[in-house]
Image (cartoon, grey):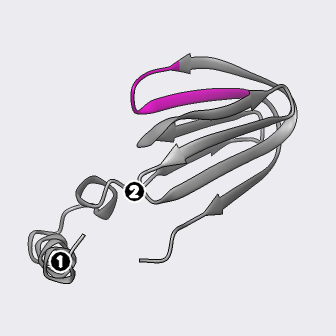
């Protein structure tokens, strides 16, 4: 993405008071009590096991660690994970 486009998007977010996750396609995570995780704006599942989930994002990846992890619901840009969630790691790209 060009520097001009990034600046224009930032100006649009600030000027129109829009949520950044919508304009920049950033991930939105909602953790409920360490037992359920709702993730929006993912680009697909890279790896899944009962102990680990790795998702591709528009800029980087997201790792979820735990035990007894289960994908309860998966949609093109949303996913719901249940189980004992012990850690979440975001690995962004330099941009």
Up the image or down, 82 lies above or below 95; here it is above
> Disc 2, disc 1: CB below 8 Å?
no
Question: Alpha-carbon distance for marks 2 and 1?
Answer: 16 Å
Q: Position of residue 66 (x, y in %)?
A: 86, 39
Outermost residue on the top side: it is 72
Binning the other alpha carbons within 10 Å of mark 1 as few (below 14), some (14 to 19) or many (20 upward) gives: few
Between 87 and 47, the one lying in front of the other is: 47
Residue for badge 1: 14
Q: Residue at x 9, y 69 (%)?
A: 16
Percent position of residue 23, x then y: 23, 58
Q: Secondary structure at mark 1?
A: helix
Q: Main secondary structure of the magenta part?
A: strand
The residues colored magenta run 74-82
Residue 77 placement (x, y as % from top left): 40, 33
Q: Residue at x 74, y 41 (%)?
A: 33
- Residue 7 versus residue 83: which sits nearer the camera? 7
Quadrant of residue 45 within the rendered picture: top right
Question: Is 52 on the left-hand or right-hand side of 79?
Answer: right
On-image quarter of the N terminus? bottom left
Question: Is 2 positioned to the left or the right of 83 in the image?
Answer: left
Callout 2 environment at 10 Å: few (<14), some (14 to 19), or many (20+)? Answer: some
Q: Where is mark 2, residue-wise?
A: 26
As helix, strand or loop, the secondary structure at mark 2 comes to loop
Residue at 34%, 57% in the rendered image: 21
Frontmost of labels 2 and 1 is: 2
Horizontal side of residue 9 vs 61, given as left or right: left
**In the rendered view, would you say 77 is above or below 65?**
above
Is 77 inside the magenta-drawn segment?
yes
- Numbered tag placed on residue 38 in the rendering: none
Q: Is residue 44 magenta?
A: no
Residue at (73, 44) in percent of width and height: 64
Sequence-earlier tag: 2 or 1: 1
């Amino acid at each position: 993405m060009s520097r001009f486009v990034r600046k224009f998007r930032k100006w649009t977010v600030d000027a129109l008071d829009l949520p950044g996750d919508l304009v920049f396609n950033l991930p939105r995570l909602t953790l409920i009590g360490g037992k359920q995780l709702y993730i929006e704006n993912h680009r697909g599942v890279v790896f899944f096991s009962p102990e680990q989930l790795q998702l591709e994002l528009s800029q980087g990846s997201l790792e979820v660690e735990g035990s007894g992890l289960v994908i309860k619901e998966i949609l093109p840009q949303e996913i719901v994970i249940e189980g004992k969630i012990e850690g979440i790691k975001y690995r962004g790209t330099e941009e």
